[in-house]
Amino acid sequence: MPSLAPRLRLLAVSLFLAGIFQNGLSAQEPLPQPDFAPVVKQMVEHSVLPGYQKLITAAMTQGRVLETLCQAPGPEQLQQTRDEFRNLVIAWSAVEMYRLGPAISDNRQERLFFWPDRRSRGLKQVEELISQQDPTALAVEDLRKKSVPTQGILALEYVLFGRGSENLATASADNFRCRYGVSITQAITRTADEIVAEWKNPDGFANLLYNTGPENPTYRNDAEAMQDFLRVISENLQSSRDMKLANALRENPAASKAKLAPFWRSNLTLVALQADLTSIRQLVEAGGLTKLAPRLTSSLDFEIDQASQVFVEQLKKPQSWSALTKDPASHKRLSYSLIPLAGAQNIVADLLPEYLGLSLGFNSLDGD
């Protein structure tokens, strides 16, 4: 993990930003608590559900391309399959933050994305499954009964980009590794389908968000529903900054550990981080938070844009993610992105809730 000094610098920056924003708002009293019901409904219908539907579509498309590779292996088809994986990662990153309701039931979040994989225990299970050519992994019903690391997006990344994946271009038709990849795409589709079904069910999670009150087992009022959405945004920013970026960058290029970030094998780490930020912007705009708190959401957009510019800039370079973390100039720029990410989280976790009369409370990432 990063040393204490960088963490204290980031904390100082965050507190400084908080002081600026608070002073800027001190001249006006917070508005009476607004009606959050339409905001929550718009977030669900214009962001959450379309996002999961795109994930389902991306997984199905990835499966079809993989099927073609399995039937007619070749370098060009392998490259096309790998290129399609980028779309799947972007689709996943758009919904990764929704760690609530259906996503946290039945370990669905982990089924889709088992990360962080401490001590590479999940990776070892995937490697063992491939080396043993376990035939039960080729049937999606059986695969979904196995451990969660063997059926998600990172398992598929190893199939397509991990050790021995180049053999997919020259292997015989319908080889085990390729068929296992197809089975993973089917498992991803099934899991995402279940999440959507639980959101849409007449008595499902969306209904809980839309009909808050004393009889509701989860949300007593619309404010609590709104708080949950701000919480998942805050946690997503925290995960991107601390767990994905800072943990990989460390104090300097020599100390960096690029492989601690997700999607390093496919060189899609920055693509995923950029998609994370895009999803936050889209959610805020889709729900209409920009109208409830225009000054703060404008500041949030500015902070996100500062980090996003760094990612876009680095994505234009030909070096891999691992090489970027070792390059002094790139390491410096990537480390800078931690500052606006800290500012963005401060706005979502502290300033926005205070202005809207909310309290985020429990953070599910505390202790990670």
Image (tube, helix red, strand yellow):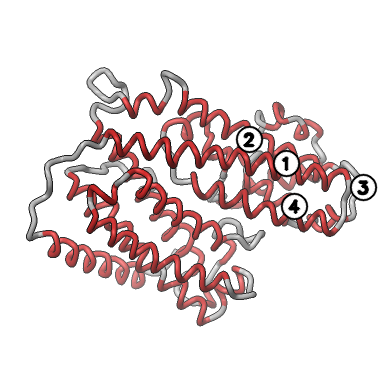
Question: Which residue is under mark 3?
Answer: 172
**Mark 2, mark 3: which one is toward the viewer?**
2
Residue 202: image location, x then y, percent: 43, 19
Q: Position of residue 318 (x, y in %)?
A: 64, 75
Drawn side of residue 328 relative to residue 149, left or right: left
Q: Amino acid at mark 3?
A: Ser
* N-terminal-most mark, 4 or 3: 4
Q: Residues within 10 Å of mark 2 (few under 14, many from 20)?
A: many
How far from the left and from the top, in percent, is residue 15? 22, 65
Q: Which residue is mark 1?
A: 63
Asked which secondary structure carries label 2, the reply is helix
**Closer to us: mark 4 or mark 3?**
4
Dot placed on the residue nearer the N-terminal end, 2 or 4 = 4
Q: Amino acid at mark 4?
A: Thr
Mark nearer the N terminus (2 vs 1): 1
Location of mark 2 (residue): 189
